[in-house]
Image (cartoon, grey):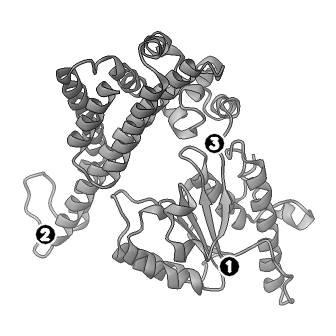
Amino acid sequence: MAVWDDLVGQDRVTAQLSAAARDADAFVTAVAAGESHPAASKMTHAWLFTGPPGSGRSTAARAFAAALQCVSPDRALGGAPGCGFCDGCHTTLIGTHADVEVVRTEGLSIGVKDTRDLVRRASLSPAGGRWQVIVLEDADRLTEGAGNVLLKAVEEPAPRTVWLLCAPSVEDALPTIRSRCRHLSLRTPPVEAVAEVLVRRDGIEPAVAEAAARATQGHIGRARRLATDARARERRAAVLRLPLRVADVGGCLKAAQELVDAASEDAKQVAEAVDGKETEELRAAMGASAGAGSRMPRGTAGVMKDLADRQKRRSTRTQRDTLDLALIDLAGFYRDVLAVQLGTGVAIANVESREAIDRIASGSRPEHTLRRIEAVLACREALERNVAPLLAVEAMALALRAG
């Protein structure tokens, strides 16, 4: 198994990264032998991976990081870096390699303090003698101040440091950052390719894998969750019933409240699974005695408050992310309605909701559907601007009724 196997439907990107990994390997080998290293024109110190949600931009970055750390003996015989089996590949892919830092923010943004810590890490020499790799999966969440801190490190990196930044689009990365990175654009993978990887990698039944891949329109992560999580399927089914529930103002407000409550419940479940364990582990590390009611040692209140704040930010982001996924499903429903109205012959994604789609398509005009799609997108933008979730969803529901 090569490190690229889970990068679905991205042959062009895989070829570019594989070529860069070869040049990077030639550079490390030449330097270690005390030789003048060859020009590594396909390799650079900073990369920007962009693509729509589910395209696999983070997967591509992690696979490239593994290829850069590959120590397979086959490389000396002309094999490409990224075998997937050696210690360098394996530890990178499971997240334990000493020279690979993968950063995922649990909050709504990445601030200056966290970025300074990351820059300090990037200035270190690699412990294994190959590359110090920083994978920043949420580069679009950098604040302006954090971006300015990162800029200097990207402009003048340490000799063996590689930055791999991920964002939904070029416009989501700060202009000063993106101008100093090599850009790789990923596309939404074909439904068939996503279904195939779900069957091969996750052992999912072919029919279930195909239905999940089609319903999520090629979003790999969401397809896997939909195929394996019954609660995710139930939540999605409830979202797809919303268009039939906005016939009057009361129905709009009730549907909006239920959608926000479902997102809050999802955030609560995540908190229950993670927060208690984190808190107990930190209490133990700070020297507290066993038991929830035991007193903490002096001087630890600030540390516990920082953890509580971090957990609150994670809960907020989980709620927003859950709502955003629901809105994507809702936009997909109206996309199917529009396809039926225009008679395009495009296969609809939400086959299980065909009756509701036909009902709404026959009872409205394409311009109504376009306005409804715009209302869903406007709600997503409002949530990005930190509008109160219930207000944003209520406004959307009323707009869906008006059509």
> Relative to 303, is 195 above or below?
above
Secondary element under disc 2, as helix, strand or loop, is helix
Rendering quarter of residue 374: top left
Kindly identify which residue carries mark 3.
188
Depth order, front residue of 34/193: 193
Kindly identify which residue carries mark 1.
129
Rate crowding at label 3 as few (under 14), some (14 to 19) or many (20 or more) other CA atoms within 10 Å: some
Q: Is residue 58 left or right of residue 287?
A: right
Residue 322 horizontal/vertical position (percent)? 36, 40
Secondary element under disc 1, as helix, strand or loop, is loop
Q: Is residue 17 left or right of residue 374?
A: right
> Relative to 90, is 121 above or below?
below
The amino acid at mark 3 is Thr
Rate crowding at label 2 as few (under 14), some (14 to 19) or many (20 or more) other CA atoms within 10 Å: few
Kindly identify which residue carries mark 2.
301
Residue depicted at x 54% and y 19%: 341
**First reached walking from the N terminus: tag 3 or tag 1:** 1
Distance from disc 3 to disc 2, alpha carbons, whole Å, reads: 46 Å
Residue 228 horizontal/vertical position (percent)? 49, 27
Residue depicted at x 87% and y 60%: 79
Rendering quarter of residue 127: bottom right
**First reached walking from the N terminus: tag 3 or tag 2:** 3
The amino acid at mark 1 is Gly
Q: Are marks 3 and 2 in contact (CB under 8 Å)?
A: no
| Res 87 seen here | no
Depth order, front residue of 230/335: 335
Depth order, front residue of 304/268: 268
Considering the image in quadrants, where does the C terminus appear?
A: top left
Distance from disc 3 to disc 1, alpha carbons, whole Å, reads: 36 Å
Distance from disc 2 to disc 1, alpha carbons, whole Å, reads: 40 Å
